[in-house]
Image (spheres, helix red, strand yellow):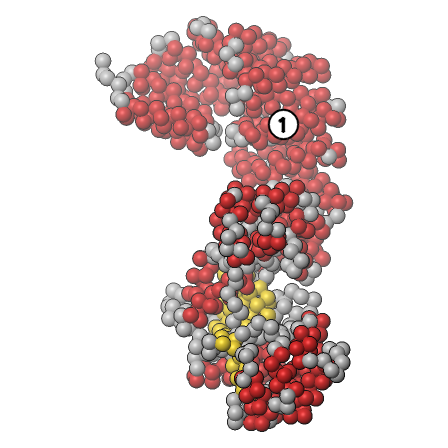
């Protein structure tokens, strides 16, 4: 409150009634009769007295409007002679030091001699937000909606534009910035009305209270405001229509609406006016142009940190001095504008604190949301305002979604989390409308903002969370078993029953692909005894898929987690299988010595539990790692053990694998004839058991041996056969190998054009198979042929 008003009233500008009004205000504020105007004004600014001051202000307004030529004019003249003005630069209201009622309405009050006190809605727009950055696309979308000249058949005129998003996402900042741009372009000469509806507070501003506030802002004296709601709406719209004719369009900016009902009575009847609404809910019921907000991009978040910090101190260069730390800080804030602004405030409070120190505090904290609090603003509080409005079933769903193992959750995982047969689509859509849940990368997928996930975990209970994890783990394990069946040869035998969960191998792979991140993270739950058994089995189920898709880092992670859990529980067989899978992943990563050690451990454990078939598998895989380590003779011995054990068990497929790899080792040491014999025998075994995929891979090995033996045409025929069968099974890596070897034969035969084409096709296949190193190597060889074509003999 400005002291100038109280000084004018105390000096008699409003007569005895004015002096009594000042005394009454002092009494309401608990001050003595001798309090000065400045002391009364300072006390009135205390939020604790907000309701008392509002009541006093309404009474004073009635007093002044009752005698506009006398009391009101005297007060205006007295205040105008002082050094503190209520407005400046003609049409800009100065709200600094003002008293705001609950429904904050920006107006300029002009007291004119010969007329009533007329509140003018010419400068109701709050100041531009400090540090505003980014949002170019959303700003452009809002300006198109507000532009009076932009309407067309393709983009019809809209009365309402609604900005929606998560609490703290920057909705009001965007709306205010856009409104300033629109005003600067002269689109709203009739002025701007701003009202905060406090839709997510415990006591939201009702539509009727908001309407009455706007009517007063438009110059309607309180005694002339009709008694019924319908009459008030009619008066509001007719007043705006007159204003459109006399002064031009008006922009109504309604912030923090929580429901369409809060906004509908505020909609003008004249299409020249526009309403800009912000809400945590989408509000499609208003027929509005919907502009949803997501988190800032990493670049925008970085710019906000730097800009806001320089507003506090132009010489503060901590962000630009350590951009890596600033990017980490932005990520820990979830690129959420509110969290970023709080981080800036924390840094501004401590000018000597390096950004890395704040990053460490947030990263190591068990209560990240608690750290994102600067005393006035809190991310947790912003989320709580939305959370406490949720019905119980939606609140439970939000808590459980926060426990989803992957960055996104499919409908099936959501159903498992809540313990239902089907996904609770209705509740998910409600949470999406409230911007507490976002739609994921595809239909039927859902995700949470990082900080909302933290909040959801914080408000949940351990008992509720453990039960949800147990349900998800059970669902994952059941589906992974069935999907793995399609990837393993054993289930491809003619006459075997088809797994009911997936119609074919492509569907099984698609399920694995979609759930991969969640599956890998769920295996990590094996560290807790309650989930260890199922998580270990899940980790073993993922081995074939992760190897097939060449996600070797994930394969190492899940096998290591499974191995440790199996060891703790004393499950020797599971531990052996995990060691063997890990050895395979290490071999794929060219970590030969570590792979050899892993396979030796697997072999010993399989021997200890008496599993001869799996021991044979470990010997075979050991041979692969020995070959990679340059120990071909030792590899031949390992393959011999694997072959003999498989023969003893009458495992023809296992024997075929051992012979395939033995042939490669024999070729390496120059025993080409023996290699061809071993490969031919392996091919016949794969064919006998109906394993066409591995038969296709073996044709590639046969081609290598034939090429080494100088039988180029036969080698090319073998490679083409391999290529055909790998394509049949969508094995892009095997396809790349066959094409790469075809290119070698063409090059050796001085056919550079054919060789270059095959190398480029191999590169494409390797890329599809997630094998960038091999793809780059093939492209390099193709480029070398183009630059230096071989001479024709």
At horizontal 45% and vertical 25% (from top left) the residue drawn is 734
**What is the quadrant of the N terminus in the image?**
bottom right
At horizontal 67% and vertical 66% (from top left) the residue drawn is 201
Tell me: 277 left or right of 202: left
Q: Position of residue 175 (x, y in %)?
A: 51, 65
Q: Nearer the viewer, residue 195 or 364?
A: 364
Residue wearing tag 1: 559
Q: Nearer the viewer, residue 138 or 400?
A: 138
Q: Position of residue 288 (x, y in %)?
A: 50, 67
At horizontal 61% and vertical 16% (from top left) the residue drawn is 597
Answer with the quarter of the image where residue 233 lies.
bottom right
Tell me: 334 left or right of 159: right
> Is residue 109 positioned above or below 366 on the image?
below
Q: Position of residue 456 (x, y in %)?
A: 67, 50
> Is residue 35 positioned above or below 588 on the image?
below
Q: Secondary structure at mark 1?
A: helix
Answer with the quarter of the image where residue 721 lies.
top left
At horizontal 76% and vertical 80% (from top left) the residue drawn is 32
Q: Position of residue 86 (x, y in %)?
A: 55, 78
Instruction: Inspect this view and state whether residue 145 appears.
Output: no
Tell me: 28 left or right of 208: right
Crowdedness near tag 1: few (<14), some (14–19) or many (≥20) residues, C-alpha within 10 Å: many
**What is the quadrant of the C terminus in the image?**
top left
> Is residue 145 positioned above or below 575 on the image?
below
Tell me: 350 left or right of 314: right
Count of marks placed on residues: 1
Instruction: Inspect this view and state whether residue 153 appears.
Output: yes
């Amino acid at each position: 409150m400005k002291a100038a008003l109280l000084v004018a009233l105390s000096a008699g500008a409003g007569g005895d009634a004015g002096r009594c009004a000042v005394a009454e205000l002092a009494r309401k504020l608990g001050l003595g009769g001798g309090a000065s105007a400045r002391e009364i004004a300072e006390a009135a600014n205390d939020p604790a007295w907000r309701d008392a001051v509002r009541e006093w202000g309404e009474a004073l307004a009635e007093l002044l409007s009752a005698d506009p030529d006398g009391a009101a004019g005297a007060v205006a003249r007295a205040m105008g002679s002082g050094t503190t003005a209520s407005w400046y630069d003609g049409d800009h209201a100065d709200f600094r030091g003002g008293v705001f009622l609950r429904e904050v309405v920006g107006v300029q009050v002009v007291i004119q001699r010969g007329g009533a006190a007329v509140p003018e809605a010419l400068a109701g727009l709050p100041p531009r937000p400090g540090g505003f950055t980014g949002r170019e696309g959303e700003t452009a979308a809002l300006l198109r909606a507000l532009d009076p000249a932009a309407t067309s058949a393709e983009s019809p005129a809209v009365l309402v534009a609604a900005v929606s998003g998560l609490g703290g996402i920057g909705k009001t900042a965007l709306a205010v910035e856009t409104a300033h741009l629109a005003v600067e372009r002269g689109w709203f000469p009739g002025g701007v009305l701003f009202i905060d509806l406090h839709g997510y507070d415990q006591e939201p501003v009702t539509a009727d209270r908001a309407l009455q506030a706007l009517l007063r802002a438009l110059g309607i004296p309180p005694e002339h405001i009709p008694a019924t709601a319908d009459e008030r709406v009619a008066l509001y719209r007719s007043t705006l229509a007159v204003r459109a004719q006399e002064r031009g369009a008006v922009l109504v900016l309604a912030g923090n609406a929580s429901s369409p009902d809060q906004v509908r009575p505020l909609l003008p009847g004249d299409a020249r006016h526009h309403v800009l609404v912000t809400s945590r809910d989408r509000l499609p019921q208003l027929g509005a142009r919907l502009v949803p907000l997501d988190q800032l991009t990493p670049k925008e978040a970085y710019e906000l940190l730097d800009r806001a910090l320089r507003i506090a101190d132009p010489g503060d260069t901590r962000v630009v001095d350590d951009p890596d730390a600033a990017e980490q800080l932005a990520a820990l804030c979830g690129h959420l504008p509110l969290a970023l602004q709080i981080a800036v405030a924390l840094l501004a409070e401590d000018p000597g604190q390096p950004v890395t120190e704040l990053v460490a505090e947030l990263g190591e904290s068990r209560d990240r949301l608690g750290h994102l609090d600067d005393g006035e603003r809190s991310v947790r509080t912003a989320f709580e305002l939305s959370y406490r409005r949720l019905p119980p079933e939606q609140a439970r769903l939000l808590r459980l979604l926060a426990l989803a193992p992957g960055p996104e959750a499919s409908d099936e995982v959501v159903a498992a989390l809540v313990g239902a047969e089907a996904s609770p689509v209705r509740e998910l859509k409600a949470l999406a409308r409230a911007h507490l849940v976002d739609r994921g990368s595809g239909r039927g997928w859902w995700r949470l903002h990082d900080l909302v996930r933290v909040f959801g975990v914080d408000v949940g209970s351990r008992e509720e969370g453990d039960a949800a994890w147990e349900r998800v783990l059970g669902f994952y394990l059941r589906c992974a078993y069935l999907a793995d069946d399609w990837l393993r040869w054993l289930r491809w035998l003619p006459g075997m029953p088809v797994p009911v969960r997936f119609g074919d191998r492509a569907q099984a792979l698609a399920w694995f692909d979609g759930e991969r991140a969640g599956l890998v993270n769920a295996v990590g739950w094996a560290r807790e005894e309650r989930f260890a058994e199922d998580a270990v089995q899940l980790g073993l189920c993922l081995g074939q898929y992760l190897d097939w898709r060449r996600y070797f880092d994930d394969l190492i992670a899940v096998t290591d987690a499974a191995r440790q859990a199996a060891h703790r529980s004393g499950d020797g067989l599971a531990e052996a299988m995990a060691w063997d899978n890990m050895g395979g992943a290490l071999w794929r990563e060219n970590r030969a010595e570590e792979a050899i050690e892993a396979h030796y451990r697997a072999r010993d454990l399989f021997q200890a539990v008496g599993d001869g078939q799996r021991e044979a598998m470990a010997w075979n895989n050991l041979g692969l790692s020995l070959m990679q380590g340059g120990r071909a003779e030792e590899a031949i011995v390992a393959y011999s053990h694997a072959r003999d054990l498989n023969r003893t068990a009458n495992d023809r497929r296992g024997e075929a694998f051992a012979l395939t790899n033995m042939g490669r080792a024999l070729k390496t040491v120059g025993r080409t004839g023996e290699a061809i014999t071993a490969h031919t025998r392996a091919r016949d075994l794969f064919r006998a058991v109906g394993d066409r995929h591995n038969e296709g891979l073996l044709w590639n090995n046969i081609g290598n041996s034939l090429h080494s033996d100088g039988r180029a045409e036969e080698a090319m025929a073998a490679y083409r056969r391999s290529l055909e069968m790998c394509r049949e099974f969508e094995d892009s890596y095997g396809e790349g190998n066959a094409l790469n070897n075809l290119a070698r034969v063409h090059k050796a035969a001085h056919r550079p054009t054919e060789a270059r084409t095959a190398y480029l096709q191999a590169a494409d296949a390797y890329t599809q198979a997630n094998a960038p190193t091999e793809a780059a190597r093939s492209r390099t060889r193709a480029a070398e042929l183009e630059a230096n074509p071989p001479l024709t003999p």
